[in-house]
Image (spheres, grey):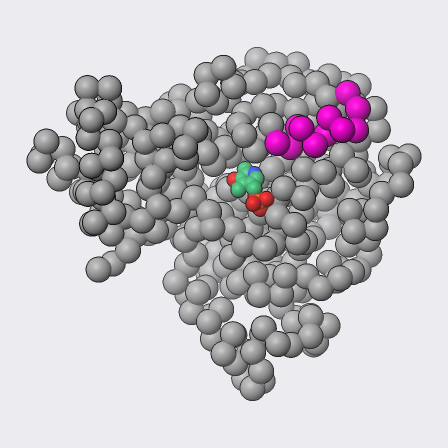
Amino acid sequence: MKKHNFSAGPSILAREVIEKTAQAVLDFNGSGLSILEISHRSKDFEAVIEEARQLFKEILEIPEGYSVLFLGGGASMQFCMIPFNFFEKKAAYLNTGVWASKAQKEAKGFGEVVEVASSKDANYTFIPKDYVIPTDADYFHITTNNTIYGTELHTDIDSPIPLIADMSSDIFSRPMDVSKYALIYGGAQKNLAPSGLAFVIVKDELLGKVSRYIPTMLNYKTHIAEGSMFNTPPVLPIYSAMETLRWIKANGGLVEMQKRNVAKAELLYNAIDSSKMFVGTAAKEDRSLMNVCFVMKPEYKEFEAEFLKFATAAGMDGIKGHRSVGGYRASIYNAMPVESVQALIDCMNEFEKQH
Ligand SMILES: *Cc1c(COP(=O)(O)O)cnc(C)c1O
């Protein structure tokens, strides 16, 4: 039976990317060696990391003066690398979910942190909009897509101070204006590659301004100077990332990704909004194009577990909602075909008919 992979992360990758990666594991570039057993300093891998870097710049239209880094440690390592490199006296954070508050928690170890706004009291069902960014803070941190709650900032906001964004789960989902950001980072395992890799896009001129000693591995300048090869980078995920970026480019780039993502999300949200059983959990204006969260209406609550079983039996994988929201979450990243979204909707309709 065909599986439809709605997992939040690690998550669906384009079939082509998986096949190319499998091929590279068996025989990389016809070299007679696996990509798993070659030096990261070999010519062939140097070409891979360079192409991945160039495709980042090309697809996201990254302006001059920014560096693209491929690092280990996931997005979570960035939660502390950011204050190490940018925190001097004070930082500002927007609290839109568990990941946002984990990032904020790390900064608190460095000094004064201003939480400009929070939607925690509403279980993060919306993104706060009326807040003031303190102009005397060193940077303002946001999370553009809240993977757990299915809320998303759909535009690049303006900030009077350096803007830093966790884009783990919506990078490459829409065209964006990189010039508005001081730093963009994320774990690769949501929309780009297998786990084990974090990407960082950083504006070079903003580095080197803090007075503390920064441990070598946590200093962005180390990795910029060494082209992400100060130590052994995550070789295989970087290879898959390169293949995903080739796939995005061949499929029309970010304009086309956004078009497809909007179409898929509208299809699913419309089905939820017109259903008798299901209801969305996120505020409509903040609904994510990547993670669609919904629950059973109170009067159908008794069928919650049954629908999960029903959908799973029909091949829908990974739709159980995060424990802090409950219900269901369909993650419909770039690589998710519209046919799979339709299959989920058919499954919801069929379940409704039977109950
Ligand atoms: C998944 C996720 C993280 C954590 O990523 P790791 O690579 O596991 O550290 C952080 N932020 C957001 C928005 C995420 O979705």
**Magenta span:** 102-112
In the displayed structure, 189 sits above or below 306; it is: below
User: Picture coordinates of residue 249 (x, y %)?
Assistant: 50, 58
Q: Residue at x 66, y 14 (%)?
A: 132
Quadrant of res 305: top left
Which quadrant of the rendered structure holds the N terminus?
bottom left
Q: Residue furthest bottom?
A: 32
Q: Can you say whether 236 is above or below 337 in the image?
A: below
Tell me if I can see residue 158 in this picture: yes
Name the one closer to the observer, 205 or 298: 298
Residue 275 image position (x, y, % from top left): 19, 28
Q: Give me the residue at 65% from left, 50% from top.
A: 73
In the rendered structure, does residue 250 fall within the stretch colored magenta? no
Which quadrant would residue 149 be assigned to in this image? top left
For the image shown, how many numbered marks are present on the structure? Answer: 0
Q: Quadrant of the C terminus?
A: top left
Name the one closer to the observer, 108 or 249: 108
The quarter of the rendering in which ligand 1 is drawn is top right
Q: Position of residue 308 (x, y in %)?
A: 25, 39
Can residue 259 be seen in this snapshot?
no
